[in-house]
């Protein structure tokens, strides 16, 4: 089964903020983050059923970068609720919906 993905506005804003920050650090690094994010979304489309961390919320780490995709799954729908920096307090994402 292939899953559909919806990315909430909050997650999009977090992603674009991170992308801009990395691009300011080194030209092209923001593009590399984007490729890793797209790769992670493709992994989720194929199989999103990773461990539930809290109240039906799941997390998948992004390769090479200290970020996580925080999401829920219902049926064949994936809802990305945050693009979360892995060094932030994990208690914060528990309140996301």
Image (cartoon, rainbow, N blue to C red):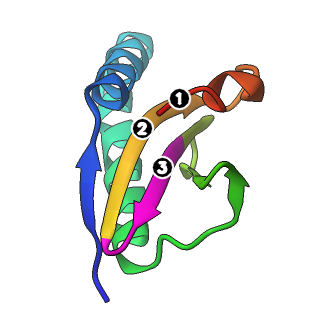
Residue at coordinates 74% horizontally, 29% vertically from top-left? 90
The correct choice, above or below, for 24 with respect to 33 in the image is above
Residue at coordinates 55% horizontally, 73% vertically from top-left? 49
The correct choice, above or below, for 26 with respect to 35 in the image is above
Question: Which part of the image, by quadrant, shows the N terminus?
Answer: bottom left
The residue labelled by disc 2 is 81
Residue at coordinates 31% horizontally, 41% vertically from top-left? 34
Residue at coordinates 30% horizontally, 65% vertically from top-left? 77
Q: Residues within 10 Å of mark 2 (few under 14, many from 20)?
A: many
25 with respect to 94 (left or right): left
How far apart marks 1 and 2 lie (CA) works out to: 7 Å
Tag 3 or tag 1, which sits nearer the N-term? 3
Q: Residue 17 placed where, x, y %?
A: 35, 15
How far apart marks 2 and 3 lie (CA) works out to: 5 Å
The correct choice, above or below, for 35 with respect to 82 in the image is below
Q: Nearer the viewer, mark 1 or mark 3?
A: 1
- Magenta segment boundaries in residue numbering: 69-76
Q: Residues within 10 Å of mark 3 (few under 14, many from 20)?
A: many
38 with respect to 91 (left or right): left
Does the residue at mark 1 contact the one at mark 2 (Cβ under 8 Å)? yes
Residue 71 has which mark?
Answer: 3
* Identity of the residue furthest to the bottom in this view: 1
Q: Which of the two residues, 68 or 57, is positioned nearer the viewer here?
A: 57
Does the residue at mark 2 contact the one at mark 3 (Cβ under 8 Å)? yes
Residue 32 has which mark?
Answer: none
The residue labelled by disc 1 is 96
Q: Quadrant of residue 68?
A: top right
Dominant secondary structure of the residues highlighted in magenta in the image? strand
Q: Residue 11 placed where, x, y %?
A: 36, 30
Under circle 1, the secondary element is: loop
Under circle 2, the secondary element is: strand
Q: Residue 83 placed where, x, y %?
A: 46, 33
């Amino acid at each position: 089964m292939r899953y559909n993905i919806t990315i909430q506005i909050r997650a999009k804003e977090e992603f674009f903020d991170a992308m801009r920050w990395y691009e300011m650090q080194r030209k092209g690094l923001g593009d590399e983050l984007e490729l890793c994010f797209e790769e992670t979304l493709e992994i989720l489309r194929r199989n999103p059923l990773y461990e539930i961390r809290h109240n039906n919320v799941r997390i998948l780490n992004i390769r090479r970068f200290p970020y996580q995709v925080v999401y829920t799954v219902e049926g064949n729908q994936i809802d990305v609720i945050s693009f979360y920096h892995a060094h932030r307090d994990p208690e914060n994402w528990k309140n996301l919906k």
